[in-house]
């Protein structure tokens, strides 16, 4: 964002001074990580990263190490008993596979950190304000597949192997609650906006069910009701917490909207129904709309009043001149030696983009939307189509006082496949992308032009490191920093404002 202030340096002087404030990006050094386990704390004051069996906490202002913990390598008793070879059980304390951390995460209040070992079958918890405090959860004979924090920051959810159950461990009481037969190990659950209710996709007597549990009452069952699906793919709770969207597996394009009481409000299926089912579903931040996409390169926008489509976006190789088209400059990394900023090329007039040919004879064809993500206010929808893996489509949604005519606003074209793209969690018009090379890419509509009006800008930003390819990225909660991940190393990027004065 650039702005210029022009005026006399002194009332008696005729000379002018131009003060220009420009946002730049400051990068940290490279640090090691394992398993891509790197995250900002919710308050953005610390950065957590795991390296094999070690958890490291750094301060974001200086990146000095604040805490270091090593997990207890002893596997749970159940994991030891289930080990078929006694010699392996004896050596398990030094086996790097059992020592490695598979999951690491902050509690929502930044007070605690969990570090889980799937191979060892345990979760260890550390306290940021007390380096000597620790707690350990042994997951038993059912094993461990995933461990996550509940919104209350004092309960840990452990998903067992084979879909046997979900265990809720309380750090306050030291007790556990159990829910049997979850359908999925890595999805199919969500919390109400206030964190009180927990919704879980379950399978009972070969039928898909939804369970609603009261998290404030030790996850007591409130009600259980059919999901109206024959083969549940996943669920998504609306931001308001009033509605649940559930949809079928990949062989049937059908979505159902239900209340928390289990009442079916509506069902949606396009006409004619596509050959394959739904890939992505995303609620609007206000809960007013629901974006639904499958393998047919169409995105349906459903409103919450009629629960029917109000508009449909369809991928096209032809882009009109009314759309802002930004293209990554050719060989810009070599020209800039990977340092500094460089604007995208803005293409004029209608353009044609390449669409990959789709082989419908193969399972899971490379087509359809692989990402739907709304910005912070819901005025923009990011869509990435697998048919055009190097392009990012940004669709504009009008404000409530404008005529409702959503449209394609901008397209960002790159030389390599986009691996990750995420909106800034605070700024409504700020997007960051990465393509697996020594750079990151940004788009923003908050730039101030010469006329004083805001306009959009797309930039390529080199990462000043000799060997670093940005394969993954995530924003800090305050939207001021980015974590950039390569296979074994990571760095952080922070926006800084430089002020220059020209006489």
Image (tube, helix red, strand yellow):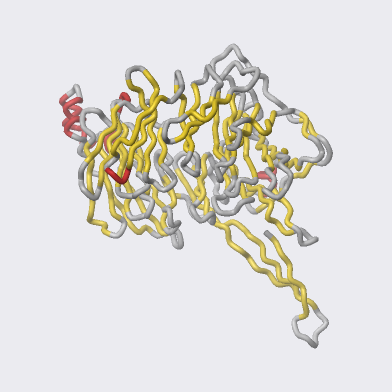
Left or right position of 324 against 356: right
Q: Position of residue 75 (x, y in %)?
A: 21, 35
Q: Is residue 427 above or below residue 169?
A: below
The quarter of the displayed image where residue 347 is located: top right
Left or right position of 460 against 287: right
The quarter of the displayed image where residue 118 is located: top left
In depth, the one of 286 and 324 nearer the eye is 286
Residue occupying image coordinates x 65% and y 37%: 392
Q: Position of residue 440 (x, y in %)?
A: 60, 46
Question: Taking the image as drawn, is residue 440 in sight?
Answer: no
Left or right position of 425 against 12: left
Q: Position of residue 37 (x, y in %)?
A: 41, 43
Q: Is residue 172 above or below residue 368?
A: below
Residue occupying image coordinates x 23% and y 35%: 139
Question: Taking the image as drawn, is residue 23 in sight?
Answer: yes
In depth, the one of 152 and 451 nearer the eye is 152
Locate the C terminus and report the quarter of the image it occupies. Answer: bottom right
Q: How many marks?
A: 0
Residue occupying image coordinates x 79% and y 61%: 450
Q: Is residue 214 above or below residue 205?
A: below
Q: Position of residue 485 (x, y in %)?
A: 49, 43
In depth, the one of 420 and 371 nearer the eye is 371
Which residue is most to the top? 361
């Amino acid at each position: 964002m650039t702005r210029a202030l022009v005026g006399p340096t002194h009332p008696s002087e005729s000379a002018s001074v131009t003060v220009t404030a420009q946002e730049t990006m400051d990068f940290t050094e490279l640090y090691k990580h394992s398993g891509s386990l790197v995250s900002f704390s919710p308050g953005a004051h610390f950065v957590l990263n795991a390296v094999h069996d070690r958890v490291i906490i750094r301060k974001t202002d200086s990146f000095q190490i604040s805490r270091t913990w090593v997990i207890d390598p002893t596997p749970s008793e159940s994991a030891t008993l289930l080990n078929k070879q006694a010699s392996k059980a004896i050596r398990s304390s030094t086996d790097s596979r059992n020592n490695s951390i598979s999951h690491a995460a902050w509690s929502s209040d930044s007070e605690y950190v969990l570090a889980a070992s799937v191979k060892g079958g345990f979760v260890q918890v550390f306290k940021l304000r007390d380096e000597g405090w620790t707690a350990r959860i042994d997951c038993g004979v059912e094993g461990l597949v995933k461990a996550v924090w509940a919104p209350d920051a004092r309960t840990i959810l452990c998903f067992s192997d084979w879909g046997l159950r979900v265990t809720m461990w309380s750090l306050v009481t030291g007790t556990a609650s159990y829910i049997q037969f979850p359908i999925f190990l890595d999805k199919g659950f969500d919390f109400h906006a206030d964190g009180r209710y927990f919704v879980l996709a379950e399978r009972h007597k070969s039928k898909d069910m939804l369970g609603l549990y009261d998290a404030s009452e030790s996850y007591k069952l409130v009600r259980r009701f059919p999901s109206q699906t024959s083969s549940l793919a996943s669920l998504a709770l609306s931001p308001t917490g009033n509605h649940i969207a559930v949809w079928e597996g990949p062989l049937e394009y059908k979505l159902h909207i239900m209340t928390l009481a289990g009442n079916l409000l509506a069902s949606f299926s396009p006409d004619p129904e596509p050959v394959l089912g739904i890939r992505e579903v995303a609620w609007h931040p206000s809960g007013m709309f629901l974006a639904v996409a499958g393998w047919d390169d169409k995105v349906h926008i459903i409103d919450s009043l009629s629960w029917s489509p109000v508009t449909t976006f369809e991928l096209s190789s032809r882009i009109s001149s009314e759309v802002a088209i930004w293209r990554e400059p050719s060989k810009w990394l070599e020209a800039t030696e990977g340092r500094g900023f460089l604007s995208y090329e803005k293409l004029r007039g209608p353009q044609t983009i390449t669409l990959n040919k789709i082989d419908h004879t193969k399972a899971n064809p490379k087509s359809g939307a692989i990402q739907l993500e709304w910005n912070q206010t819901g005025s923009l929808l990011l869509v990435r189509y697998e048919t055009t893996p190097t392009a990012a489509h940004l669709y504009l949604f009008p404000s409530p006082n404008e005529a409702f005519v959503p449209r394609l606003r901008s397209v960002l074209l790159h030389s390599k496949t986009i691996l990750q793209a995420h909106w800034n969690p605070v700024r409504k018009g700020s997007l960051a992308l990465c393509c697996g090379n020594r750079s990151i890419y940004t788009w923003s509509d908050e730039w101030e032009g010469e006329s004083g009006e805001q306009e959009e800008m797309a930039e390529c930003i080199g990462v000043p490191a000799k060997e670093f390819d940005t394969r993954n990225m995530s924003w800090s909660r305050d939207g001021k920093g980015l974590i950039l991940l390569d296979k074994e190393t990571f760095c952080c990027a922070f926006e800084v404002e430089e002020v220059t004065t020209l006489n």
